[in-house]
Image: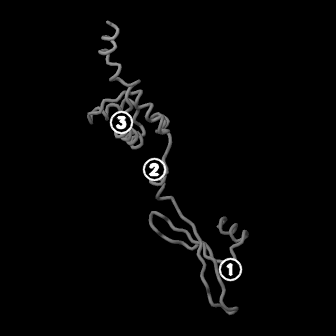
Amino acid sequence: MAELITAKYDGAAIRGVGRPRTGEEIESLVVRVAEENRSWGYRRIQGARSNLGHTIGRTTIAEILKRHGIEPAPERQRKTTWKEFLIQHWEQIVAADFFTVEVWTKRGLQRFVVLFFIELSTHRVEIGGIAAEADGLWMKQMAEA
């Protein structure tokens, strides 16, 4: 009889197995904070979450980041994102492309290939070269010029 009473009031029917999973909203906030603040470690993220009223453990943060393929802070901090690279090197980045133009010559209508460069920071355009045929020899000459 004592076993029946114990089984009824031990709370086993109410409890689930293991710890409840962290809510998706909190998980997405942890991921966002880690991506936006690459130098922040687990404890710093934990502190930021607690300032917003979310109590979350350091190991839970580590597991969330691992699940999302986000490395620990020292590794995250060493790597540069593509956006950061572009911002840091914007003044030195030049784009190159070609366009063709039809020109009326003594031989009739002839197509020329124009190589041009654009400085992305100033939008300044420079003509690199013009040729009737853009073959390998011409491209090598343009690269050496």
Q: In terms of secondary structure, where does tag 3 sit?
A: loop
Q: CA distance from mark 3 to mark 1?
A: 64 Å
User: According to the image, what is the colour scheme of the structure?
Assistant: one colour
Q: CA distance from mark 3 to mark 2?
A: 31 Å
**In screen coordinates, is 85 left or right of 6?**
right
Q: Residue at x 32, y 23 (%)?
A: 14
Residue where numbered disc 2 is placed: 84
Q: Quadrant of residue 96?
A: bottom right
Counting labels gives 3
Query: What's under tag 1, amino acid-wise?
Result: Ala
Residue where numbered disc 1 is placed: 132
Q: In terms of secondary structure, where does tag 2 sit?
A: helix
Q: Residue at x 44, y 54 (%)?
A: 87
Quarter the C terminus occupies = bottom right
Residue where numbered disc 3 is placed: 23
Can you give x and y, in whole percent of width and height, for residue 118 in the image? 51, 68
Can you give x and y, in whole percent of width and height, for residue 123 in the image? 46, 68
Of callouts 3 and 1, which one flags the residue occurring earlier in the amino acid sequence? 3
Q: In terms of secondary structure, where does tag 1 sit?
A: loop
The 10 Å Cα crowd at callout 1, few under 14, some 14 to 19, many 20 or more, is: few
Give the answer, above or below, for where 45 lies relative to 93. Answer: above
Give the answer, above or below, for where 79 lies relative to 20. Answer: below
Q: CA distance from mark 2 to mark 1?
A: 40 Å
The 10 Å Cα crowd at callout 2, few under 14, some 14 to 19, many 20 or more, is: few
Mark 3 or mark 1, whichever is nearer to me: 3
Q: Residue at x 32, y 31 (%)?
A: 47
The 10 Å Cα crowd at callout 3, few under 14, some 14 to 19, many 20 or more, is: few
Q: Which mark is residue 3?
A: none
